[in-house]
Image (cartoon, helix red, strand yellow):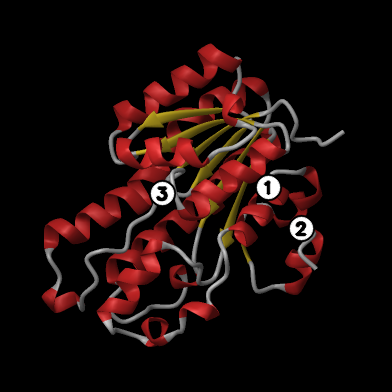
Amino acid sequence: MDELKGKTAIITGASKGIGEATVHELVSRGVNVIAASRALTNLEAFMSRLSGHADKVHPMKCDVSNFEDIKKITRFALDRFGTIDILVNNAGLIDPISKLAESDPDGWCNVADVNYKGVYYCIRSVLPEMLSAGKGVIVNVSTGAATSPREGWSHYCSSKAAALMLTKTVHHEYATQGIRAIGLSPGTVKTEMQVSIRESGLNPISKMSPSDHSPPEKPAKIIAWLCTNDAKEFDGDDVSIKDHTIQKRAGLL
């Protein structure tokens, strides 16, 4: 039997891209999923695309930069299923893209609020429940930009670097108490974010052809594998989708 069957997961940024693909992947393996997105219209469209597993998906409107929203989702998961086994921090922003000297402070800080504070809020909300249960998996969707600066992405690179340190800190503080924390750097993926990047014209990523980007189903399969005990040796750090060992272990090769 699939070890993920019957578990409960919260996925942020769940209505499109990597988040939506991860919802599909996890529910196909028997996971109950709370699918969080800040746009209600996105959630409605997302639910219309589900087939065969809609009974296992519970869409909830949520702004990850608002701690009260996160607490509501946590309470819902506990009231409905009695446990939170998996947290996938996928919600992320990159707009507005600009060089640092021309950056808009409000827009810059909004990206930081979602990409970093949002990850903290989600971890802070579910971690006590996971500790009480003596188990839990936290997967943070990361990026190579967390360790390599990109022109025009100061907000994205720095907030993702901070989120990477949260991954490492959770592992450092709670690995001995049954809590697993791991990040996935998914490479460039065919999502709406790539449209904004391409339109910016900044840095080499914007010059890539759409055909060079991976489908979101590929990182989704790796995220599901990271939630299993087979991936435990990689806890506490980011793994890269470009690593053939990771692809093979996740069943992509």
Q: Residue at x 50, y 48 (%)?
A: 19
- The three-letter amino acid code for the residue at tag 1 is Ala
Please, which residue is most extreme toward the top here?
79
Assess whether mark 2 and mark 1 are in contact (beta carbons under 8 angstroms): yes
Q: CA distance from mark 1 to mark 2?
A: 8 Å
**Tag 2 residue:** 250
Q: Quadrant location of residue 40?
A: top left
Q: SS at mark 2? A: loop
Neighbourhood count class around disc 2 (C-alpha, 10 Å): few under 14, some 14–19, many 20 upward: many
Judge left or right: residue 212 versus residue 59: right
Q: Residue at x 68, y 47 (%)?
A: 224
Tell which of 124 and 247 is nearer to you.
Answer: 247
Please, which residue is most extreme toward the right here?
1
Neighbourhood count class around disc 3 (C-alpha, 10 Å): few under 14, some 14–19, many 20 upward: many
Q: CA distance from mark 3 to mark 1?
A: 17 Å
- The three-letter amino acid code for the residue at tag 3 is Ala
**Tag 3 residue:** 91
Judge left or right: residue 206 versus residue 102: right
Q: Position of residue 93 (x, y in %)?
A: 33, 57
Q: Position of residue 71 (x, y in %)?
A: 38, 24
Q: Kindly tell me whether residue 131 is visible in this rendering.
A: yes
First-in-chain label (3 vs 1): 3
Q: Quadrant location of residue 32?
A: top right
Q: SS at mark 3? A: loop
Q: Which mark is residue 7?
A: none
- The three-letter amino acid code for the residue at tag 2 is Ala
Q: Position of residue 214 (x, y in %)?
A: 57, 70
Tell which of 24 and 67 is nearer to you.
Answer: 24
Neighbourhood count class around disc 1 (C-alpha, 10 Å): few under 14, some 14–19, many 20 upward: many
**Tag 1 residue:** 224
Q: Residue at x 39, y 70 (%)?
A: 194
